[in-house]
């Protein structure tokens, strides 16, 4: 039995018999969701709501970039100020870098490439995967495109030929598919590395200011105070950012007001002529005077835009418009004023370049500023830690990260998650980096590489989005590459120069994470292909279920797998060892779509396995990479409700004749679309409808009895080994590294939070 929902677009048209889809794929029982509103159509919100969201975003999004004035000048002038106009050159660099990268690139271009409101590296990757078939897991279904969030709003036919050519070449090239996945993994790894370095440099820079008030404060004491703050910060993560979220925005607003106000004070008091730095001529003069040293100093200037990626990554919690408002009205002006005021102070006090931020604070404001600086640095750290949790959740859902437990800490705010294992690993890494590097100068060298790498990858993905999806004019694409690309590559070359001075750290982090992610994803794909090649045909299911050796026992069995196209081979293994089949059985395939969220009403796809009296169903449960799995309500109850809806919808379609080609033709018995020419035909259809209703009632009663008898969850626990004759590399990859990862991570039942009393694990060995 199958079903297909009605479609309002057919009303008023002449009725034509409808050919039922063949049973190679699942049918979507929800059809068109009437009255469904797009989840992220937030542009209709009034300005009051936008301003509210803009205020809240100040505390979440801008903590990192907002605390950059703590260390930018000290990281740029590492050997002191050689020439007074060098300060104008650096200020000019900071001004144009802040204007072109965070403001122009991210706020006005990249934010528009959001994935139904969500941003980040995975959002761009998912957009590309939805437009072109470049995913490496063959789990695509035609029905996926019926999900409301899946559809892309494409522009008109401009540059269609160029976009089609690029799409075709990408789909045919395995190298491109692997490269896109590799680039996404690299971006993810770098963001996680950023999550390690941000707390270190922010907290250490803020605590370092206490030296101004306490001469007895040594470097060792500063380091250990910073470590204590970091440990406390990570220990409270399990309570969730929701508990302290409302305090973030006021603190960061106070921070921006203070640094902006002090900037204006220093600008007026010390040297108002620094306004000349708006002339880019001072950048040319700076490079002319200092040559190689000026190029090296770019590694310090780039720290002014740390945390810029958060503008895009955190847009899912707010809206594009609210981020644009808060950046243009608050963050950007406050940062420009802060850097301008520090430059004015430094022009008169060259000797204070090491601790410029706290030296430039007026005496009466020192202690309030110190307290707010520490709080702001903690908030900046919190934002990056939360971002790290979110991006790991995304990579986990797409099979790119080993299984870890995801805890959703807020019922009010989507996307706020906590991952215990990752939290403690981040804490150990932060403590290790703080104790090992000790100064912000060395950490700054490491920090810059992580920041610029992610920005460069984002720009690369944006070029693909512009050409293929937006179909932007080629001259605009070239202008974007020339202006933004050249700036980022220049900064990247500078930060890589400091590889041996701490720059190796994020690359080492990224390498370790990349290896882990590659191993997991590689074996994940091999397992999927193994199950696809060895899946059980519907005929074999019928044969197994009707075998005289098989006993039917009361109850509902839910069998979990990730195979979308068919029934996994582990079921045959189960039947061979346990010759009993529950009175109703659902094969549940957990599938991740390359979109951020799937509406609950569009999440389930059902198909009934013939013959009907087996009561065997297949169900694909589709999630987006930001969806909470098994969290919205008890999963089994939701599954059973949707199964009953699927059975009821089946009565809308009654087979009436079978043509010679084997396709089943059906007619709809709704809304008077069909008018019979004779009374006997009407009577026949009424009888058929009555019999169909009786069958539906019988099926639902059977499912209810099975549920009352008890629900059992069956999970396949597969042991993976390399097949005989495999090469040495493949054996090491699968038999050693993958199995070490698997043994030390959470099992499937713990990830899905399935009750142990009703759990049955089925073991099987896969030779890959």
Image (cartoon, rainbow, N blue to C red):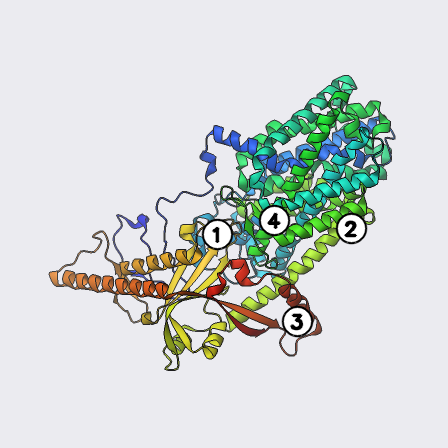
Separation of disc 1 and disc 2 at Cα?
40 Å
Q: Taking 544 as reference, is 299 above or below it? A: above
The disc at residue 389 is 4
Note whether 428 is above or below 83 in the view shown: below
In this view, the mark in front (3 or 1): 1
Q: Which numbered disc, 4 or 2, marks the residue that appears first in the sequence?
A: 4
- Spatial separation of the CA atoms under disc 3 and disc 1: 34 Å
Q: Quadrant of the C terminus?
A: bottom right
Please rate how many residues cluster around mark 1, counting C-alpha atoms within 10 Å: few if below 14, some from 14 to 19, many from 20. Answer: few
User: Residue 142: percent from the left, percent from the top?
Assistant: 44, 58
Numbered disc in front, either 4 or 1: 1
Q: Is residue 325 left or right of residue 502?
A: left
Corner quadrant of residue 748:
bottom right
Q: Of the two numbered discs 4 and 1 on the same chain, state the one appearing first in sequence.
A: 4
Nearest to N terminus: mark 1 or mark 2: 2
Of the numbered discs in the image, which one, if any, rests on residue 735?
3
Q: What distance separates the C-alpha of mark 3 from that of mark 2?
A: 30 Å
Label 3, label 4: how far apart the Cα atoms are: 29 Å
**Residue nearest the viewer, comparing 404 with 477:** 404
Disc 3 or 4, which lies upstream in sequence? 4
Left or right: residue 443 compared with residue 635: right
Q: Residue at x 54, y 72 (%)?
A: 763
- The numbered disc on residue 631 is 1
* 10 Å crowding of disc 3: few (<14), some (14-19), many (20+): some
């Amino acid at each position: 039995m199958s079903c297909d929902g009605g479609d309002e677009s057919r009303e008023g048209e002449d009725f034509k018999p409808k050919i039922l889809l063949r049973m190679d794929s699942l049918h979507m029982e929800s059809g068109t969701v009437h009255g469904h509103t797009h989840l992220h159509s937030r542009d209709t919100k009034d300005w009051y709501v936008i301003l509210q969201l803009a205020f809240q975003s100040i505390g979440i999004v801008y903590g990192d970039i907002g605390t950059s004035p703590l260390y930018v000048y000290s990281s740029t002038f590492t050997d002191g100020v050689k020439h007074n106009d060098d300060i104008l050159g650096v200020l000019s660099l900071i001004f144009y870098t802040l204007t072109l990268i965070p403001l122009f690139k991210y706020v006005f271009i990249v934010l528009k490439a959001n994935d139904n409101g969500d941003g980040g590296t995975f959002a761009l990757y998912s957009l590309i995967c939805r437009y072109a078939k470049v995913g490496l897991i063959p789990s695509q279904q035609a029905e996926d495109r019926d999900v409301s969030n899946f559809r892309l709003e494409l522009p008109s036919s401009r540059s269609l030929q160029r976009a089609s050519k690029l799409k075709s070449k990408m789909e045919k090239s395995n190298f491109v598919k692997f490269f896109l996945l590799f680039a996404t993994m690299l971006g993810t790894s770098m963001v996680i590395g950023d999550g390690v370095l941000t707390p270190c440099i922010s907290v250490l820079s803020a605590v370092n200011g206490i030296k101004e008030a306490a001469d007895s404060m040594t470097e060792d004491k500063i380091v250990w105070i910073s470590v204590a703050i970091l440990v406390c910060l990570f220990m409270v993560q399990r309570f969730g950012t929701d508990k302290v979220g409302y305090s973030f925005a006021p603190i960061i607003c106070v921070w921006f007001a203070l640094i902006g106000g002090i900037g204006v004070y220093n600008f007026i008091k010390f040297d108002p002529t620094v306004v000349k730095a708006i002339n880019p001529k001072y950048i040319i003069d700076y490079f002319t005077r200092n040559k190689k040293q000026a190029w090296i100093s770019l590694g310090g200037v780039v720290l002014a835009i740390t945390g810029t990626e958060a503008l895009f990554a955190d847009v899912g919690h707010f809206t594009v418009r609210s981020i644009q408002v808060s950046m243009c009205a608050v963050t950007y002006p406050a940062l420009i004023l802060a850097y301008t005021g520090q430059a004015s102070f430094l022009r008169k006090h060259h000797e204070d370049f090491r601790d410029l931020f706290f030296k430039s604070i007026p005496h009466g404001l020192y202690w309030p500023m110190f307290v707010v600086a520490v709080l702001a640095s903690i908030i900046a750290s919190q934002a990056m830690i939360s971002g790290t949790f979110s991006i790991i959740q995304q990579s986990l859902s797409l099979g790119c990260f080993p299984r870890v437990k995801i805890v959703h800490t807020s019922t009010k705010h989507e996307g706020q998650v906590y991952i215990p294992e990752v939290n403690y690993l981040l804490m150990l890494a932060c403590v290790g980096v703080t104790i090992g590097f000790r100064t912000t100068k060395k950490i700054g060298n490491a920090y810059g590489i992580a920041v610029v790498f992610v920005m460069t990858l984002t720009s690369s993905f944006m070029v693909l989005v512009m050409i293929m999806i937006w179909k932007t004019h080629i001259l605009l694409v070239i202008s974007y590459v020339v202006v933004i690309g050249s700036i980022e590559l220049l900064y990247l070359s500078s930060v890589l120069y400091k590889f041996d001075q701490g720059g190796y750290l994020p690359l080492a982090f990224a390498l370790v994470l990349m290896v882990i992610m590659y191993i997991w994803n590689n074996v994940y794909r091999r397992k999927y292909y193994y199950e696809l090649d060895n899946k059980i045909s519907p005929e074999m299911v019928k044969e197994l279920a009707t075998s005289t050796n098989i006993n039917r026992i009361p109850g509902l069995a839910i069998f979990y797998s990730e195979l979308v196209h068919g029934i996994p081979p582990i079921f045959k293994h189960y039947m061979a060892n346990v010759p009993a089949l529950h009175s109703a059985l659902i094969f549940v395939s957990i599938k991740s779509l390359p979109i951020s969220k799937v509406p609950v009403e569009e999440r389930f796809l059902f198909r009934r396995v013939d013959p009907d009296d087996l009561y065997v169903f297949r169900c694909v449960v589709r999630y987006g990479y930001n969806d909470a799995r098994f969290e919205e309500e008890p999963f089994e109850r939701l599954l059973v409700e949707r199964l009953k809806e699927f059975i009821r919808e089946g009565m809308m379609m009654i087979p009436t004749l079978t043509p010679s080609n084997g396709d089943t033709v059906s007619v709809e018995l709704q809304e008077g679309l069909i008018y019979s020419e004779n009374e006997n035909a009407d009577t026949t259809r009424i009888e058929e409808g009555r019999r169909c209703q009786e069958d539906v009632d019988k099926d639902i009663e059977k499912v209810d009895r099975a549920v009352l008898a008890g629900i059992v969850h069956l999970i396949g626990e597969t042991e993976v080994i390399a097949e005989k004759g495999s090469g040495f590399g493949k054996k090491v990859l699968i038999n050693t590294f993958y199995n070490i990862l698997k043994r030390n991570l959470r099992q499937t039942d713990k990830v899905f939070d399935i009750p142990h009393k009703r759990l049955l694990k089925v073991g099987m060995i896969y030779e890959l």
